[in-house]
Image (cartoon, grey):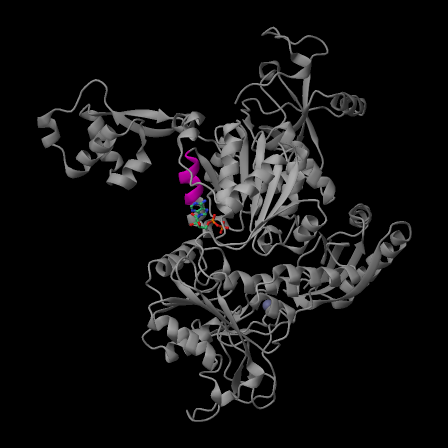
Amino acid sequence: MSPIQLPLTSEKLPESGVEAGSRAFCTTVIPPLDGEFIYEYGVSTHGHLAVGDVIEVPLGRRTTNAFIVSLNSDKEAKTLEQMEARGVSIRMISRESTSQRAFSPQHLSFYEWIARYYAEPLSKILDLAIPAPAVTKPQRGYRLSTVSSLSQTEALSLGPIQSRVTELLKSALDPILASTLKSKCGASAATLRSLVQKNLIEEVLIDKTDQISASADLLAIEAPSLNDEQQSAVTAIKNLGDGFSGTLIQGVTGSGKTEIYLTLILEALQKGLSALVVVPEIALTPQLTERFISRLQIPVAVLHSSLKPKERWRHWSDIVSGRVRVAIGARSAIFAPLHNLGLIVVDEEHDSSFKQGEGIRYHARDLALVRAKLCSCPVILGSATPSLESYNNALSGKYLHVHLRQKYHDAAQSTFEIVDLNTIKPWKMKSKSISPNFFLGLKKTLDKGGQAFVLYNKRGFASYLQCSSCEHVLGCPHCSVTLTFHRNAHSLICHQCSFTMVPPAICLACGAHEKLDHDAEPIFAHRGSGTERVHEELGQLFPTARIAVLDRDTASSVQDYVEILRRVREREVDILVGTQMIAKGHDLPGVIFVGIVDSDVGLHIPDFRAAERSFQLLTQVAGRAGRRSEQGHVVLQTRVPSHPSLVLTASSKYDEFAEQELAMRKSLHYPPFHKLLRVIVSAADRSVALKMAAELAQFASKLSEQLKIQVLGPAPAPIEKIRTLWRYHILMRSPSVASLQHAMKQLKRNYYSKDDTRVSYDLDPHDML
Ligand code: ADP
Ligand code: ZN
C-alpha cells in the first residue's frame, strides 16, 4: 500500500510527542452497524492512513474492522468539539492496527451514490460490496538453485516426481508456486524440501507483483481481424470519445459481440486504463473467461460466487492496488475497486440475475451506468434480446444503438415450427408431452448424429399431487404454493421454501389411502409435469439416446453444472433436457435441434414482465440451435399459438416484439416509462400484516398529494404466504424516480421490520410475486 499524505499533516511530524492541535482523527463505518464512528490515531500512524483503508478499532470490549470514510476534515473537528463538550471521550484505533486498502475516495463516491439511491446507510452498502478483509501473505514458490547446477549423476538419482519438478523449473523464467508444483508434478512439501536440501532448488517468496507482465506485451497479441459490421461498431463506439457514453449492442448469439468487447478492452488497456466486465454468472461461462484470459494476456481477476473468502479478498486487493486492471465477474463485480476505468461491459444485459433479490436490491446493469457516469467512461450493454429498459434508451437516443445482424460463422437462420397442442388429440401424442412433430425433429437430429436441447422450464416429475377421491391438492404447509413431486428424490418439495416431505400414503383431507392392490388407481394423481418426467418420456421414445438433465436438482453446484456441459460439449450426451439453465450462451456447435416442451410456462404469471421474459427465454434457447455449418431447427409446443411472445420468437422479430410491448407498457404506465417502488409487508399473523400494510399505504397516499406518485394497494401478494409469513404488497409508481425515493425515505423512517413484522422495499422491482 502506498502511503497517502494526510491533508493536515503534510509536513513530517517529529517522532516524539504531538504538537498541540495536531491530533489526528478519522471517521469510520463499521458494518453492519449504521452510522459513523470517530477514532483518534497516533503520531506514528500519521501519513499512513487514507480514505478507504480498513483498520482495527476497539468497539465496546472487542476489536473490529472499520472502513475509513474521511480523515481530519472540518466535519470531524466539529463533531469532536460537540462530543468532547458532552464529555464523550474519543478512543484510539487499535495499537497494532495495520491497515489494508479496501477502496479509494473515487469508489467511495460510487458507494455513497448507491446508499442515497436506495435510501440505505453507507455501512450496508460497504458490507455488501466489500469482501471480508483477510491477511494476504506472499506465497511460497521455488526456482532452480543458483548455486549448484544439476549434474548428470544427480539427475539420474532423482525420483520421477523430483525430475518433473526440476524439468519444469528449468523451463520456467519465473519461480513457480508450491501449489502449482503440487498440481502439475504431484510434488509434496516433503519432495520439495528434499530437493532444497540437495541444493538443487531454492525457496523464494512470491509476491503477486512478480507475475505481472509488462503492458507493452499487449501490442504483441494477435487478434482476429473484425468483419465489416464489427469494425463499424467499434468505430462508432470510439467516435463517442473517452468520456461517458452508453452503447447497446444488439446482436444474436455468435454475431461477434465478445470480439468487439475484447477489441475495446485492449484499447483501454493500451491507454493505461482498466476495464470491468459484468456477466450473468461467471462460473457458468468458463469458456468466456478463458477467452478473456488468453486474449488479454495480463492478469484478470475472475470474481465468481464460489470463491473462498480469502481468494475473494486477494482479488480485491490485487484490483485496489492496481496490480490487476481487468475484472470479470457476476453481479457483485460492479463494486470492484478498479482505478481509471476505461470501459464497462455488461454482457447479456437483459439477464434477470443482475438484479439482487434480497437485502439491497440493486441492479448491476443500472449501477454500471451510474458508475460509468461517475468516472466518465463508456459503458457497453450487449444482448440478443435487450431489456425493454435498454432498448427504449437506445430508441430515444440516450444510447448508441449498434446492430450485429449476422452470425459470424454465417450458418443459415434456424427454421421454426409452432406446434399447437390444442389441435392434437391426446392419443396422437407420442407421449404425454411430446407431439409427433417434436418427435420427428428430434429423431432426424439423432439419426444424423446431431445433438438436441429440450427446454422445459419446470423442475421435478409432477407439478403437484391431487387426491383422486376428494380432489385435495397437496400444498406446502408454510407457503401458499403446491408441493412439486420429485420422483428421483422420492419427495414432495416446496419450490419457495424447500420444505420436503415423503409423499403420504393417506389423503389428509378425506382419509382415502393408497390401496395395496397394485392394479388399483393410485390415490394421488400426478398433475402437470417437469424435467424429470420429460426425461423419462424421452428415454422411452429414444431408448438408445444418451440423455442428461440440467436443472437445479441435477446441478446443485457449479462443478456439476460445468461437468454436465462438458459432457455435452464432448458429445457424451445426445439430448440435454433442462430448465432455463440450458439457455445461457454456451458455444455448443453440435446442437442442431431445440425443442420447447411447453412454451407457455412463465407466460401466465401476474407480472408485467412475463411476456418480455418469455420472449427472451424462448429466443435465447432457440439461439442454441445451429451454429457453424448446420442449419438449426426449433419446435415450440404451445396452447396459445398466437401469443406475440411466441409468434415473434418464431419469426425472429425482436424489434417488433419490443415495440408492441413498449406501447403497452406506456399506455399502462409501467417501466421503463414509469418507475415503480414495491413494498412488501409480511407477518405470521395475517391481520397484523394487513394492518401495517394498510397504514403504510395510507401514509404513502398522504405523501402522494405533494409528490407525483400513485399508490396501489395494499393487496395480497400473488404468492400470499411464504415461509409461514402472510404477505401484502403496495405498489407505488411515478414518472419521477426522485419522487419515489423521497417517499421511500419517509416510509423507511416510519415503517421497518420489527418484532414479527417484516417490511421490505424494492425500488425498480423485478420480482412482482
Ligand atoms: P457473441 O459474443 O455475439 O456470442 P462471439 O464474439 O463469441 O459472439 O463470436 C462468435 C464466434 O465467432 C466465436 O467463435 C468467435 O471466435 C468468432 N468470431 C467473432 N468475430 C470474429 C472475427 N472477427 N474473426 C474471427 N472469428 C470471429
Ligand atoms: Zn414452502
519 lies left or right of 638: left
Query: Range of the magenta residues?
Result: 290-297
Which residue: 80% across, 56% down?
733
* Quadrant of the image occupied by residue 233: top right
Residue closer to the observer: 343 or 90: 343
* Residue 304 is at least partly visible in this image: no
* Quadrant of the image occupied by residue 338: top right
Figure quadrant, ligand 2: bottom right
* Residue 610: percent from left, percent from top: 65, 65
Q: Quadrant of the C terminus?
A: bottom right
166 lies left or right of 204: left
Up the image or down, 185 lies above or below 22; here it is below
Residue closer to the observer: 328 or 513: 328
429 lies left or right of 377: left
Up the image or down, 303 lies above or below 456; here it is above
* Residue 21: percent from left, percent from top: 73, 11
Residue closer to the observer: 447 or 111: 447
Up the image or down, 20 lies above or below 711; here it is above
